[in-house]
């Protein structure tokens, strides 16, 4: 059964502005929106890369997390750290720390980008 559908549209230049301000601002932003697992990967791999890679990593996570929050509400109010976005194949997947009301749910993810805009759609399904 579909519990909810969420969408978020992000102007990537918002994240670019944060990254261009420097590593102190980027680090603070990353700690705010990333899960512990994502922070570890960001700090060890992404933070040392060029700005464009940092922007892509952070923007993707911001957009998809906003979408899943919208899809899960009002059944569960998620926190940034409850959601981990992982890209191991051609498409990102989500590891979500679901509460009792959405236990055993799945988040189906779709991401699209063009012309400096990023759109994320998430469908939350429960069995």
Image (tube, rainbow, N blue to C red):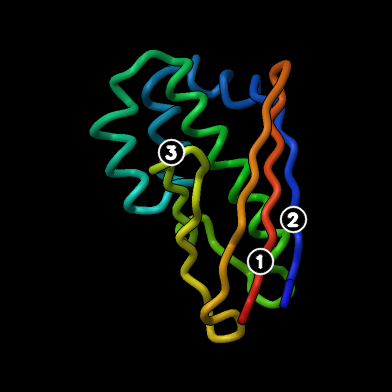
Q: CA distance from mark 2 to mark 1?
A: 8 Å
Badge 3: residue crowd in 10 Å (few <14, some 14–19, many ≥20): many
Q: Is residue 15 above or below residue 29?
A: above
Q: Which residue is pictured at 47% across the width and 37% down the height?
A: 29
Mark 3: secondary structure: helix
The image's mark for residue 124 is 1
Q: Which residue is pictured at 73% across the width and 44% down the height?
A: 8
The residue that label 2 is drawn on is 6
Looking at marks 1 and 3 on the same chain, the residue that comes earlier in the sequence is marked by: 3
**Quadrant in which the C terminus is drawn:** bottom right
Q: Is residue 72 above or below residue 84?
A: below
Q: Nearer the viewer, mark 1 or mark 3?
A: 1
Badge 1: residue crowd in 10 Å (few <14, some 14–19, many ≥20): many
Q: Nearer the viewer, mark 2 or mark 1?
A: 1
Q: Nearer the viewer, mark 2 or mark 3?
A: 2
Q: Position of residue 77 (x, y in %)?
A: 63, 69
Q: CA distance from mark 1 to mark 3?
A: 25 Å
Looking at marks 2 and 3 on the same chain, the residue that comes earlier in the sequence is marked by: 2
The image's mark for residue 11 is none
- The answer to the question of whether label 1 and label 3 lie on touching residues, with beta carbons closer than 8 A, is no
**Quadrant in which the N terminus is drawn:** bottom right
- The answer to the question of whether label 2 and label 1 lie on touching residues, with beta carbons closer than 8 A, is yes
Front position in the image: 89 or 123: 89
Q: Image quarter for residue 42?
A: top left
Q: Position of residue 114 (x, y in %)?
A: 71, 21
Q: Position of residue 124 (x, y in %)?
A: 66, 66
């Amino acid at each position: 059964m579909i519990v909810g559908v969420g969408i978020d549209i992000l102007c990537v230049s918002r994240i670019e502005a944060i990254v261009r301000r420097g590593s102190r601002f980027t680090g603070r932003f990353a700690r705010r929106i990333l899960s512990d697992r994502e922070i570890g990967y960001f700090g060890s791999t992404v933070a040392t890369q060029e700005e464009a890679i940092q922007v892509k990593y952070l923007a993707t996570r911001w957009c998809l997390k906003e979408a899943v929050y919208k899809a899960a509400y009002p059944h569960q109010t998620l926190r940034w750290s409850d959601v981990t976005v992982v890209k191991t194949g051609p498409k990102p997947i989500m590891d979500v720390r679901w509460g009792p009301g959405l236990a055993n749910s799945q988040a189906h993810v779709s991401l699209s980008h063009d012309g400096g805009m990023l759109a994320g759609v998430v469908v939350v399904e429960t069995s």
